[in-house]
Image (cartoon, grey):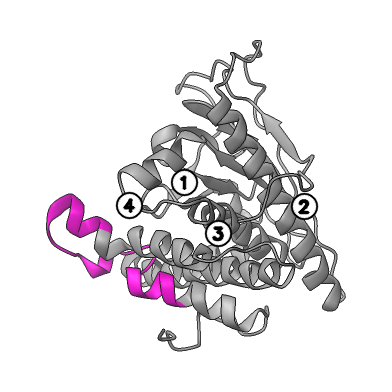
Amino acid sequence: MKWQGRRQSSNVEDRRGMRGPSRGGGMPMMPIGGGLGLIIMIVLFLLNGGLGGGNQGGTPVDPQPQQQQQNMPTSAQEDQLGDFAKTVLADTEDVWHDLFAEQGWTYKEPTLVLFTDSVESACGIAGSSTGPFYCPGDQKLYIDLSFFNELSQKYGASGDFAAAYVIAHEVGHHVQTQMGITEQVFGLQNQMSKTQFNEYMVRFELQADYLAGVWAHHVQNKGYLEEGDIDEALQAAWAIGDDTLQKQAQGYVVPDSFTHGTSEQRSSWFYEGFNKGTIADGDTFNLPDPQH
């Protein structure tokens, strides 16, 4: 991906090297999903009307203050990853501002929080093992940049656009919140069985993959992609499918426990978004799974 020397987002909180809060405090949280921590963290108040509908999304809730310390020095590699993440975030801002404007909507930009080891959000406290996540309570994305090394070394999804896909997926959750989809989906949780709700979660996560593909479509039109970038994103989507992760972890698959979709579903919906490039074609809840 051609990212160096371009605009970086200013919507970034750099908490790397700060001492995180203890796990005894913070607000209650409900982690939804699994698979490398590409999850959306939902606070309990979400199910009781904590988020507003429409394209303006929810009302941010500030977490308890972090213990503030001087940031510890970061390596040159970490600094480069940070610059990369800020550039990708800026690209998502440009794309989603344009696409929302076409619908007569206003896009409210999320904030990216970079952290080390653990972090406190409006959704509670999470460690690095959680992986990147989005919290609708404060409309922020949370990433420990060491995750990208794990994505490459442990799961074989290397390349800068594999990392860009991860960021774009979490921004996709923010788009869902802005459009009122998050509130609608989680409002169903108490109306159905766990298995049925897991099926809705799969469709919800696949929509975030589709929206990441939509973003990739438009950055390609801007001339930012290089040969092999889309293959890197597809490999990342495949590597974090529920079936692939379950086979690696336990040797067998339990479809009723899926929360993000199979490798085939995740890569196919990303590719569908990349091909279509529209919001309207991303109704993963009602449309059949695409093939690629």
CA neighbours of label 1 inside 10 A, class few (<14), some (14 to 19), many (20+): some
Whether the residues at callouts 3 and 1 have beta carbons within 8 Å, the answer is: no
Q: Amino acid at mark 1?
A: Met
- Residue found at the very far left of the displayed protein: 251
The magenta-colored residue range is 245-268
Q: Amino acid at mark 4?
A: Gly
As helix, strand or loop, the secondary structure at mark 4 comes to: loop
CA neighbours of label 3 inside 10 A, class few (<14), some (14 to 19), many (20+): many
Q: Is residue 190 visible?
A: no
Where residue 43 appears, x then y in whole percent? 55, 45
Q: Quadrant of the C terminus?
A: bottom left
Asked whether 264 or 62 is in front, the reply is 264
As helix, strand or loop, the secondary structure at mark 2 comes to: loop
Where residue 129 appears, x then y in whole percent? 38, 36
- Residue at label 2? 109
N-terminal of the two: label 3 or label 1? 1
- Check the image and report above or below for 239 versus 71: below
For the residues labelled 3 and 1, the Cα–Cα distance comes to 19 Å
As helix, strand or loop, the secondary structure at mark 3 comes to: helix
For the residues labelled 3 and 4, the Cα–Cα distance comes to 18 Å
- Check the image and report above or below for 186 versus 109: below
N-terminal of the two: label 2 or label 1? 1
State left or right for residue 30 relative to residue 167: left
- Residue at label 1? 30
N-terminal of the two: label 2 or label 4? 2
